[in-house]
Image (cartoon, grey):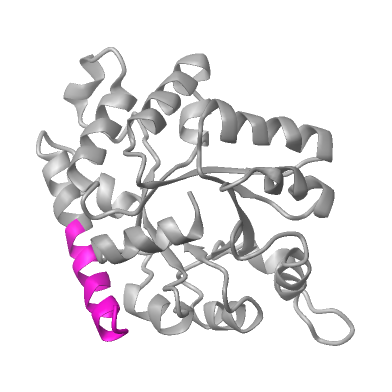
Amino acid sequence: MTRAELIEQIKLKKSFLCVGLDTDLTKIPKHLLETEDPIFEFNKAIIDATKDFAVAYKPNTAFYECHGPKGWESLKKTLDYIPKNIFTIADAKRGDIGNTSRYYADTFFNYLSCDSVTVAPYMGEDSVSPFLEYENKWVILLALTSNKGALDFQMIKDENGEQLFKKVLKKSQTWGSDENLMFVVGATRAEGIAEVRKIAPNNFCLVPGVGAQGGSVAEVAKYGWNDDCGLLINSSRGIIYASQETDFAEKAGEAAKQLQIQMAEILAEKGW
């Protein structure tokens, strides 16, 4: 998917919502466990209920890989089921030596047909560049996360007082462009989003942490907005586990709609 196509979907749906498909067999409604593929049946119902409000879906591959071949099958079926006009993100956090990254890229862009994949930048340019070679595909690079351990490395300052995450933002922009490179920025670090925008004003940001983790749509938009919206705000647990009863899909749809309404108001304020 191109940047222009993504922006078109944001305008059409009046939404910049990404739904995280972190499907945990211990949390889905019990009646689904009797089906042949509980993960896919759950995801299918969630997608049907939220596709009018979401411009992106983000399955976290760990929730699928842990089930071996059957999990990979569920992941592929899920990705194939998502409407083609909705942006797909493989939340895989890959990043290895160039030859290995090349095969990771082949897996997610060719076999699974994802629009994007999350990538860790620690090993540098040659670990990221294989993902950037695909036309109309995206790298979503980890930049500033909101987990406690982010303080271990991302905030370290050099002799000039520059934090490591800022170095990553600056250097990585020489590898790709705002047409194929996004950044992951945690929603619970609102002040950090503003810092990211100073360095990467034109790139899209994938912002997890809204909903169950306490992030605010309004705060994220306040600090992260750019002329093309430039935001994909992800909610996982707050939507997909809005109910664990037979009405789970209906409740997921309601939760997604509530976030979409907030986003529509922001887009209207911005003249979209």
Q: Is residue 243 left or right of residue 182?
A: left
Taking the spot 77% from the left edge, 73% from the top edge, the residue there is 167
Can you give x and y, in whole percent of width and height, for residue 238 in the image?
A: 28, 54
The answer to whether 120 is drawn above or below residue 7 in the figure is: above
Q: Measured from the top left, where is residue 206 in percent x and y?
A: 49, 61
State the count of labels: 0
Q: Which residue is at a point 46% across and 83% down the rendered structure image?
A: 223
| x then y, percent, for residue 172 | 74, 64
Position of 217 relative to 1 (above/below): below
Tell me where residue 219 appears, x and y as whole percent.
38, 80
Q: Is residue 254 left or right of residue 15?
A: left
In front here: 66 or 100? 100
Residue at figure coordinates x 72%, y 30% from the top left: 103
Q: Is residue 260 magenta?
A: yes
Q: Give the residue at the far right of this rendering.
A: 159
In the displayed structure, 248 sits above or below 68; it is below
**Is residue 9 highlighted in magenta?**
no
Query: What residue do we see at 23% from left, 64% from top?
Result: 260
Q: Is residue 208 visible?
A: no
Magenta range is 257-272
Q: Look at the image and tell me in which quarter the C terminus lies.
A: bottom left
Q: Main secondary structure of the magenta part?
A: helix
Determine if residue 239 is in view.
Answer: yes
Q: Give the residue furthest to the top.
A: 36
